[in-house]
Amino acid sequence: MTTDATRASSSAATSARSRPALEIAVTSAAGAVTARDGGADRVELCSALELGGVTPSQGLVEAAVATGVPVHALVRCRPGGFVYDADELDVMVREIRALVRSGVAGVVVGALREDGSLDVDAVRWFVEAALDAAAAPHPSTTPQELAETPARAPGSRRLPGVSPLQITVHRAVDRAADPVAAVAALVGLGVTRVLTSGGASRVGAGLASGMLTRMVEVAGDVQVMAGGGVQLGDVPTLVAAGVDAVHLSAKRAQAVRASSSRSGTTVSLGTEASTDSWFETDPELVRAARHALDQA
């Protein structure tokens, strides 16, 4: 017999499952804590956010994982484009294995071919490296525990007693010759989700062009996470478009303190931005993004 309470419970469960997730891009363990406390469901961890992000260091990964928030680590060996040679791909596969062994909840990867299409072979290699590293026994695992661990089924991302390792393909798809085709090519590769702005510099433009909506339509079982210049006012429209998550950096610039350099003297250590400022996660922006998603 179905009661009103049962129907209400079922409706609440369905709503909870469909609730869009909030992911915050962070560059520090402090940022991970700020995101966690502000209501983020997970963080994307990277370094050099001002360059579009590169792979974070081992120490930073360990510190972020220790905060308790699910950490998804960017795997990008250098700034610039997303067409990689064999040596660069090898480095990123090594980074994936190290990151998974460090306890991340997921990795964020991507690559393109010279013709601007998705590098399906590279993505498949990244996925296999991540899943193999996740399936490998931890160094502290005893022989008895190893014997009692069921084998991982082909294509499975779930490990016994552990949340499934998640694999996100980043905004390399937005640089593809055909961004919609790049998203469609992810189906069947073992990818959990794709981060995209709808083939534009900012997600608002991707919405306006209709490309983001087309990506949602072709993504199949790959989740679509909207990100790239997200404004709080974009959130209701993004949710209406059917995205599974919203990603933003929620950052603010922090200037170098005056006492950090000689008065009246500027010694450049690279670009002006990297010399004299850095980004911190803004708790007010995180809370506002969480509220906007909850109200959408």
Image (tube, rainbow, N blue to C red):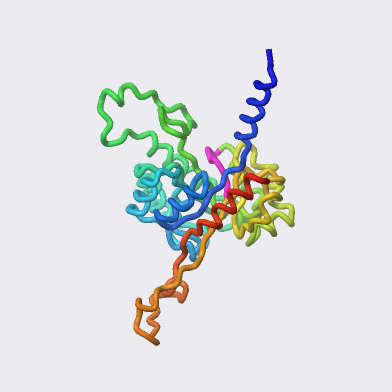
Q: Nearer the viewer, residue 205 or 151?
A: 205
Residue found at x 27% / y 23% = 144
Measured along the vertical axis of the image, is residue 271 above or below residue 165? Answer: below
| In-image side of 81 versus 88 (left or right) | right
Q: Horizontal and vertical percent for residue 148?
A: 33, 21
| In-image side of 158 versus 295 (left or right) | left
Q: Horizontal and vertical percent for residue 51?
A: 49, 65
Question: Which residue is the extreme one toward the top?
Answer: 1
Measured along the vertical axis of the image, is residue 55 above or below residue 274? Answer: above
Measured along the vertical axis of the image, is residue 183 above or below residue 206? Answer: above
Asked whether residue 192 is drawn in magenta, I would say yes
Q: Horizontal and vertical percent for residue 113?
A: 55, 54
Question: Which residue is the extreme one toward the front?
Answer: 5
Q: Quadrant of the N terminus?
A: top right
Q: Quadrant of residue 103?
A: top left
Do we see residue 113 in this rendering? no
Residue found at x 59% / y 52% = 289
Residue found at x 68% / y 51% = 212
Asked whether residue 220 is drawn in magenta, I would say no
Q: Horizontal and vertical percent for residue 276?
A: 43, 74
Q: Which residues are magenta?
A: 189-195
Q: Nearer the viewer, residue 201 or 65?
A: 65
Total marks placed = 0
Residue found at x 39% / y 37% = 134
Do we see residue 198 in this rendering? yes
